[in-house]
Image (cartoon, rainbow, N blue to C red):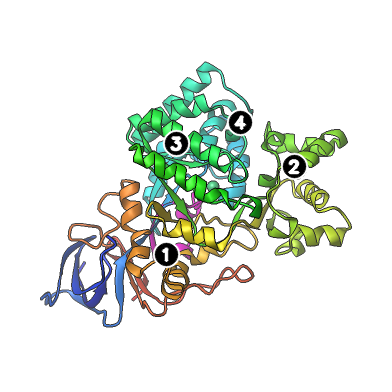
């Protein structure tokens, strides 16, 4: 393969430093030289006048666990060359004795079918290594670990089960997983006592992995939930990343600054804690996330049988009304499993309730039954002011948290990175372009231990995005989320062209 010479480029190197003019030479899969006026007569010359080069973007929190293997292009088109999967307690391994149980647990987030699965942790890790679209690193999901040893049963586990989880986790970390994730608002992980988490965090820290957490509450219990995680990190001595930090629901918005203060105080104690966040005020998840997670004890089949029992259904209904942080008009249906309710996609639960002449909560419970819980939502969570505070905080890494749906996905799946560099940085001026680039390149690479990635530097992998800084943006909206980005000229991954010229 001939060398590549990117000439006369404006370089943003991923460290947060100001841009500078230079040529950049690539040999094989590596960057070999960066300097003005490089002479490389045999190299293929790529004229970069008017183009800004940045390191390939790193999406350090995604749910593309299956799609990175399928060769989907949504991320690459945005300039993303590296993804970290296995977040929020969901990973495609370790294999469960009953593979259908793992699929039932994860499919809402993975957008999976009824056939995926790998015979071993190593087999999955080899499959992602061979991805044609991304450099992929993976976290071991706590929910998946639990399913492997105890199925979807909730509550404290027996000592023998805890020992099995510890050894499966240690095995996965030695086979190449880079850390451990929890999803403490998703059954069955939500039912785990802190002691169980401590033991697994200790294993993770001992193996040098990172621990990431979708914490127990982003609602009224946000601050206590962050404190629980900080305590785990204090005792384990390991690295902690709080996932998609935010306060959900207008009544809770004032809690975000308190949660950030807990993180800052922990850092002052030399606890290694940071957080990630996505650049949208809306989030998305499975629709069952609105329910009390105890209603999912035993998995989806058990939930459905509870919803068919009038007494139990009433109890779930009352508890849902007690805990829900959203207004019903904040929750939009983004996908449904069957054909019969396709017309509901894009509608709010308030609208669906009024169409069906039902209270929104009843309309939702009906819908969960009709769809056998196979439904996802897009929900308006946060204030713009809080979003700005989290995105601009020195401890934040910016992520998509994107996941695929068979319906209308959240626009973050198609637009996070161009939106950050365009709307958030260039238009609103919340972050300078080098700062914004740093939060999706050098910073996550260092945080997740992704060696020789995340910077434009000799010796590093040639993951390179070429963009027009005055144009880059995402036109994707909540209504039309699949519109592709503007202003990305080309993307190279490991020295090979992946998008553009
Ligand atoms: Zn999450």
Q: CA distance from mark 3 to mark 1?
A: 34 Å
Earlier-in-chain disc, 3 versus 1? 1
Residue extent of the magenta highlight: 61-83
Q: Residue furthest right?
A: 357
According to the picture, the residue beneath numbered tag 2 turns out to be: 322
Above or below, 334 against 18 in this view is above
Which residue is under mark 3? Answer: 230
Task: Pinpoint residue 274: horizontal percent, then vertical percent.
Answer: 40, 46
Q: Which residue is mark 1?
A: 76
Image spot of residue 157 (x, y percent) = 57, 22
Q: Earlier in the sequence, mark 4 or mark 2?
A: 4
Q: Nearer the viewer, mark 3 or mark 1?
A: 3
From the top left corner, tell me how far across and down residue 135 is, in percent: 36, 54
Q: Quadrant of the N terminus?
A: bottom left
Q: Are marks 3 and 1 in contact (CB under 8 Å)?
A: no
Residue drawn at the location 62% of the way across and 50% of the way down: 252
The residue located at (48%, 61%) in the rendering is 388
- The answer to whether residue 119 is visible is no
Of tags 1 and 4, which is closer to the observer? Answer: 4
The correct choice, above or below, for 111 with respect to 185 in the image is below
In this picture, residue 193 sits left or right of residue 199:
right
Camera-nearest label, 1 or 2: 2
Among the two numbered marks 3 and 2 on one chain, the one whose residue lies closer to the N terminus:
3
- SS category of the residue bearing label 2: helix
Label located before the other in sequence (1 or 4): 1
Residue 475, image x and y in percent?
Answer: 53, 74
**Is the Cβ of the residue at disc 1 closer than 8 Å to that at disc 4?**
no
């Amino acid at each position: 393969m001939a060398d590549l010479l990117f000439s006369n480029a404006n370089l943003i190197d991923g460290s947060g430093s100001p841009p500078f003019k230079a040529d950049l030479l690539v040999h094989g899969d590596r960057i070999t030289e960066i300097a003005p006026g490089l002479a490389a007569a045999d190299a293929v010359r790529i004229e970069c006048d008017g183009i800004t080069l940045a390191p390939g973007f790193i999406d350090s929190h995604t749910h593309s666990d299956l799609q990175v293997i399928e060769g989907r292009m949504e991320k690459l088109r945005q300039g993303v060359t590296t993804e970290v999967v296995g977040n929020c307690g969901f990973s495609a391994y370790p294999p469960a004795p009953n593979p259908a149980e793992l699929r039932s647990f994860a499919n809402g987030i993975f957008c999976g079918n009824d056939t995926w699965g790998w015979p071993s942790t190593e087999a999955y890790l080899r499959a992602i290594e061979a991805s044609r679209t991304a450099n992929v690193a993976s976290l071991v999901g706590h929910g998946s670990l639990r399913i492997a040893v105890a199925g979807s049963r909730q509550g404290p586990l027996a000592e023998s089960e805890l020992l099995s989880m510890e050894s499966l986790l240690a095995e996965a970390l030695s086979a190449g997983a880079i850390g451990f994730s929890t999803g403490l608002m998703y059954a069955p992980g939500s039912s785990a006592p802190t002691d169980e988490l401590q033991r697994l965090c200790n294993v993770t820290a001992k193996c040098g992995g990172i621990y990431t957490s979708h914490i127990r509450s982003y609602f009224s219990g946000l601050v206590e939930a962050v404190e629980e995680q900080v305590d785990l990190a204090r005792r384990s001595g390991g690295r902690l990343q709080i996932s998609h930090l935010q306060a959900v629901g207008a009544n809770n918005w004032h809690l975000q600054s308190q949660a950030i203060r807990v993180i800052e105080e922990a850092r002052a104690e030399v606890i290694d804690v940071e957080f990630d966040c996505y650049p949208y005020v809306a989030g998305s998840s499975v629709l069952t996330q609105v329910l009390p997670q105890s209603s999912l004890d035993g998995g989806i089949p058990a939930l459905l049988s509870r919803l068919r029992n009038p007494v139990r259904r009433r109890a779930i209904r009352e508890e849902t009304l007690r805990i829900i942080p959203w207004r019903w008009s904040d929750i939009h249906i983004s996908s449904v499993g069957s054909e019969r309710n396709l017309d509901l996609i894009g509608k709010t639960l308030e609208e669906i309730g009024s169409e069906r002449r039902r209270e929104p909560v009843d309309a939702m419970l009906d819908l969960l039954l009709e769809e056998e819980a196979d439904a996802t939502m897009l929900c308006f969570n946060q204030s713009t002011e809080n979003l700005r505070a989290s995105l601009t905080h020195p401890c934040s890494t910016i992520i998509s948290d994107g996941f695929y749906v068979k319906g209308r996905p959240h626009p973050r799946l198609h637009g996070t990175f161009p939106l950050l560099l365009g709307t958030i940085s260039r238009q609103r001026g919340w972050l300078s372009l080098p700062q914004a680039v740093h939060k999706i390149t050098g910073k996550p690479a260092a945080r997740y231990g992704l060696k020789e990635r995340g910077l434009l530097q000799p010796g590093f992998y040639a993951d390179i995005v070429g963009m027009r800084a005055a144009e880059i943006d995402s036109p994707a909206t909540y209504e039309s989320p699949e519109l592709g980005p503007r202003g990305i000229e080309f993307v190279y991954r490991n020295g090979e062209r992946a998008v553009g010229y």
